Amino acid sequence: MPRDHKTPSFSELLKVAGKIGCLSFGGPAGQIALMHREFVEERGWIGEEQFLHALNFCHLLPGPEAQQLATWIGWKLHGMRGGLAMGVLFVIPGALVILVLSILYAVAADLGWFAALFMGIKAAVLAIVVQALLRLAGRALQTPLKRALALGAFLLLAVFGLPFPVVVLSAGAIGMAVAAWRPDLLGINPAALVSAETPRAWGQSLRAVAGGGLLWGAPMVAVLALLGPDHVLWQIGLFFSKLAVVTFGGAYAVLSYMAQQAVEGYGWLRPGEMADGLGLAETTPGPLIMVTQFVGYLAAYRAPAPFSPMVAGLLGAMLTTWVTFVPCFTWIFAFAPWLERLENAPRLKGGLAAITASVVGIIANLTLWFALHVLFRRVSDVALGPLTLTLPEPASFDWKVALVAVLAALLIFRLRFGIILTLAISAATGLVLSFL
């Protein structure tokens, strides 16, 4: 007999949403597991099949899948107000924590002891990213075509320097074309590709897109009118708005693109600071993509006029968070009524499978980028015809960082330590090594 699923009161939903928002450590895997335990196993508010279908649906969308799953659960139980409550409470605790950490970082970044702590954190982040790469590769690359897509994505980014959005969208287009011809090449069972006859919720979707678009663009219009297109807040809002549309595959997939643009394109951060921000985001609850708030804060803090650095940083952080997460709510409210139809769409399944495979190559490029900028003090771009290679200067190798990175890898892969404990041990080791 199927289990009856009761609908909780709105106040009950708020209590559980607040609990999840404060305890959602461990990245998407840990956050999704926490929601499954709370909503499916313990309370029975959501069915197992519903939960899995919604999770697959969230993988189709750009943005952090765990936050979007939380929003969908709220929408399923209490409509739009439930979705807003779940989504906001999932984000707010982590956003507040990383904002405080960003303020401290901006003030103390030039202090010796603080730099030593973050030397250890940067080294640990390198091991954490390698772990994410290996986990995703093990799940996503079951067929030769998927492995070829991953390798192609890596080469297009690392060697040819193609923009991240071009690589992601091209992979999606290839996947959609292959799914219509030979879905088995992407590991998709053709027998499962059936068209679902479900109601068409055009009105609800159009209202959600229109409302979300207005909310998304409102602060950008204000910035443009008051400060102009040359101000750093306009650049921050525009960049992270574009990023919100192409963040397929989670935070790790988009970090290399964000890091390269923030460091080399806009000059907002120094190379090692991107790894610092990721280390901070790893230690806070909520989605890992909150590292964008760290970038937005520092970018505005360092070009504050006509505000004080603190006020500019706060505005930059708030604008970044707004344009990053408003689209996440928009996607859910627009497409959730189409869930069953989307779940069974052959071309969309193929596009998602190909994007997931390409994300492995994208994260491999991120791993290489981090390794070069963390292990070496100086790197330079070398042009070889149409190719551009980023090469380190061997004399700038930092043995202390390498030692901590090896220690972090041992803790994660051999001793199975958690991320937060590994970061803490690595930070302490970095502090000790600074006295040598």
Image: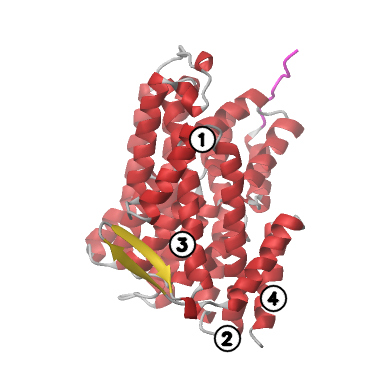
- x, y percent for residue 24: 65, 50
Whether the magenta-drawn stretch holds residue 40 is answered as no
The tag on residue 369 is 3
Instruction: Look at mark 1 in the image and give the residue it sits on.
Output: 58
1 or 3: mark nearer the eye? 3
**Disc 1 and disc 3: Cα gap in Å?**
28 Å
- x, y percent for residue 168: 38, 42
Residues shaded magenta: 1-8
**Residue kind at label 3, given as amino acid type:** Trp
Instruction: Look at mark 4 in the image and give the residue it sits on.
Output: 429
**Disc 2 and disc 3: Cα gap in Å?**
25 Å
Q: Earlier in the sequence, mark 3 or mark 4?
A: 3
Circles 3 and 4: CB atoms closer than 8 Å: no
- x, y percent for residue 27: 61, 50
Q: Earlier in the sequence, mark 2 or mark 3?
A: 2
What's the residue at 49%, 22% (across, down)?
184
Q: Residues within 10 Å of mark 3 (few under 14, many from 20)?
A: some
**Residue kind at label 1, given as amino acid type:** Cys
3 or 4: mark nearer the eye? 3
Mark 1 element type: helix
1 or 4: mark nearer the eye? 4
Mark 3 element type: helix
**Disc 2 and disc 4: Cα gap in Å?**
14 Å
Circles 2 and 4: CB atoms closer than 8 Å: no
**Residue kind at label 2, given as amino acid type:** Gly
Compare residues 39 and 385 and report the one nearer the observer.
385
Compare residues 52 and 153 and report the one nearer the observer.
153
**Disc 1 and disc 4: Cα gap in Å?**
39 Å
- The answer to whether residue 264 is left or right of residue 130 is left
